[in-house]
Amino acid sequence: MGKPKCIGILGGGQLARMSLFAGKRMGFDIAVLEKEPGSPAGQLTHLEFTGTPANKTILNKFAASTDVITLENEFIDYRILEYLEALGKKVFPSSGTISLIQDKLIQKETLKKNNIAVPAFTAVDHKTDYEKTAALLKLPFVLKSRKMGYDGYGNALVKNKKDFEKAFDKLTHRHSKLMAEEFVKFTKELAVMIARTRKETVIYPVVETIQKDHICHTVIAPAEIKKNLYDNSRKAALSSVKAVKGYGLFGIELFLTAEGKILVNEMAPRPHNSGHYTIEGCITSQFENHIRSVLGLPLGSADMVKPAAVMINLLGKTNQTGEVKNYNKALEEKNLHLHIYGKKSSRKGRKMGHITIIGNNHSKIFKAALNTEKKIII
Ligand SMILES: Nc1ncnc2c1ncn2[C@@H]1O[C@H](COP(=O)(O)OP(=O)(O)O)[C@@H](O)[C@H]1O
Ligand SMILES: [Mg+2]
């Protein structure tokens, strides 16, 4: 037998871990490159590379062991992907696609240019830009780091000049460049996953996402919204992927406004928290279609296997080790699917795992999931 195809993942967190499970199950090898050894994905493969992508010696070794390279976050500089492509490696999503996504300002400009509805936005280059930004976007507005933001860490709500100056200093600490957006009074936040190869496109159900403190907390699939809004969400998501010439797997976050408008908030070129429910909720999980899409293989169906699914993130409740402290209580619910990411340490608010329940009735499984989430100590 020949060697199995090897997919290299830049990053070793929970998204890489779940892609790894899907890839291994189908008979592929997975290589992981992550800063520290023993990462959630790195601990599961003999092809674990430790270092940063900026370290060319490690990057070359990692690349040499792979047939195709993908990623689990958009923070990797697109020029590193260009370097890998110049080595003759296939990278999905490509450096070109990532260059249009990883800077939130360039991403929004790209979407707008392609006639996709987005919140009003503007670049913020100087600490003296408050008046002009407030005049354009009205108050309050949202100041965002153009790069390296996640789980709301790169965002700040601005209600006055003092907020602005404080947030400017805090956010430029994260990354030097900022942008601002109108504050959208959304009635719901929605998300759509899309897997795309040169030959086909698979669009997952539209889901509702509920964030707490800017972090995704609950995902309800499918979203309970009117059919025309459902269809418009899928259309906006597909147009967004086409706008960045995206091939691979994408998560598109949307706002539904009180007037029934669908606005694209942002897109992620990778598996997404809003798609974790697909592991048990859909015929083919986002992670399996991630692997299939980067290999250019036929994609699997995104149809749900039951009418409803609810996913709740397990955020750290302690500042201790990363295991569940009370498995007996945690597993009392008979329909529960428990996912723990294998992180070495827990921290209050850190994503440590998630739970999913699928069933016939949204409110019943939502209650059961909330009840279980309360019990689990991690
Ligand atoms: N323009 C906006 N108006 C209102 N709420 C927003 C806006 N932008 C972001 N948010 C809120 O903050 C959350 C995180 O912001 P997002 O831009 O998606 O950054 P991240 O990269 O951290 O996910 C969103 O899911 C939403 O709840
Ligand atoms: Mg987001």
Image (cartoon, rainbow, N blue to C red):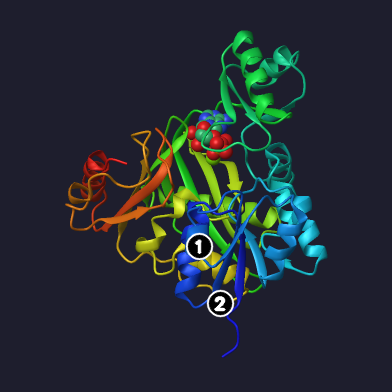
- Which residue occupies the foreground of this view, 75 or 219? 75
Residue 355, image x and y in percent?
32, 51
Give the label on residue 19, or none. 1
Which amino acid type is shown beneath numbered disc 1? Ser
Query: Quarter containing ligand 2?
Result: top right
Residue shown at the point (35%, 61%) measured from the top left = 281
Horizontal side of 202 relative to 58 (left or right) equals: left
Q: Is residue 168 above or below residue 13?
A: above
Give the spatial CA distance, label 2 vs label 1: 17 Å
- Residue 289 image position (x, y, % from top left): 52, 67
Give whichever of 202, 258 is nearer the camera: 202
Residue closest to the far bottom: 1
Q: Mark 1 Cα within 10 Å, few/some/many (few <14, many 20+)?
A: many
Q: Amino acid at mark 2?
A: Pro
Can residue 270 be spotted in the picture? Answer: yes
Q: Is residue 71 left or right of residue 218?
A: right
- Queried on whether the Cβ of the residue with tag 2 lies below 8 angstroms from ligand 2, the answer reads no
Q: Residue furthest right?
A: 86
Q: For mark 2, does the 10 Å Cα neighbourhood hold few (<14), some (14 to 19), or many (20 or more) residues?
A: some
Sequence-wise, the earlier of marks 2 and 1 is 1
**SS assignment at label 1:** helix
State the residue at coordinates (35%, 62%): 280
Q: Which mark is residue 374?
A: none
Q: Which mark is residue 298?
A: 2
